Image (tube, rainbow, N blue to C red):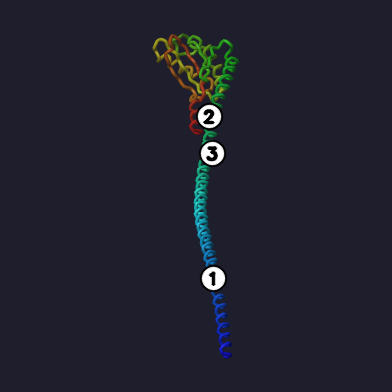
Amino acid sequence: MKKLVPLIFFLISTTLIQAQKKKDLLNKITELEQTILALNDSVSVAKRQINVSNANAELANREAAELRNANATLLQNLTNFSKISKQNTETVNSALSSLNEKEQQLRLISDSFAKNDSTAIAILSQSKQILGANAKVGAANGSISVSNSLLSLFENDQSEVLSEEGKATIARIAQLITKNPKREITIEALNITGDFDVSYTQAAAVANELWKANGIPAERLKIATKDGNFKEGITIKLSPDLKAFYSLAKEKM
């Protein structure tokens, strides 16, 4: 009996120790399970965060791509706008250059007309001084015309020979012509009878007197006859050199 007591005590102690270890093991298992649960929760949270981060990253990448596309489009638009602006600037500059050129051309024509008008006024003043206040001098379309009756130039209205008075009149007209070397000279015979042969011969006689007796170059002299519409006589016109004007206008334009 005395030998069984220690054995029983040993068995009880062993049983108690094993029970304690089992309890400790169960507690450890419980602790580990809780740790695993916590870790699983952390992993779930981490996965959710990763998903959110991935979604945000994808959104950011998409927005970045859209931004790059927008920037590329904007850059292309700016490039196109720059090209168009440059083209428009070149077009405007070309138009301004063309307008300036046209303005200069129009100014040239305007200046020519103004110069011709002022020259006509000067010739009109000269004619009064050279031919006298009673001379029949007129101005029209930039031309100065000196009108003379047939009887003031010829021996009679059918004559082809200049009178002395007529020669003196032609000499004075020649002075006026000499002072204006750039004017074209037209000797125009007006006729009311229809006999233009006589009128042409009379105009030729005046031209011959201007040339031979007064030194006016023959190439400056033109002869014309026309129906005088109840008027007859010899009209000497000093006209602008239209041929030179048209040549100048053609050259400049």
Q: Nearer the viewer, mark 1 or mark 2?
A: 1
Q: Nearer the viewer, mark 3 or mark 2?
A: 3
Label 2: how many Cα within 10 Å (few below 14, some 14–19, many 20+): some
* Depth check, front residue: 121 or 51: 51
Q: What is the CA distance from the residue labelled 1 to the residue labelled 2?
A: 110 Å
**Helix, strand or loop for disc 1:** helix
Residue 212 shows in the view: no
C-beta proximity under 8 Å, tags 1 and 3:
no
Where residue 63 appears, x then y in whole percent? 51, 53
In which quarter of the view is residue 11 placed? bottom right
Q: Residue at x 53, y 28 (%)?
A: 109
Where residue 126 appears, x then y in whole percent? 59, 18
Q: Residue at x 48, y 28 (%)?
A: 246
Q: Is residue 18 above or below residue 63?
A: below
- Which residue in the structure is indicated by mark 2? 106
Name the amino acid type tagged 1. Thr
The tag on residue 30 is 1
Q: Nearer the viewer, mark 1 or mark 3?
A: 1
Where residue 102 appears, x then y in whole percent? 52, 32
Q: Residue at x 52, y 58 (%)?
A: 52
The tag on residue 93 is 3
* Depth check, front residue: 216 or 246: 246
Say whether disc 3 or disc 2 marks the residue closer to the N-terminus.
3
**Helix, strand or loop for disc 2:** helix
* Depth check, front residue: 182 or 141: 141
* Depth check, front residue: 252 or 233: 252
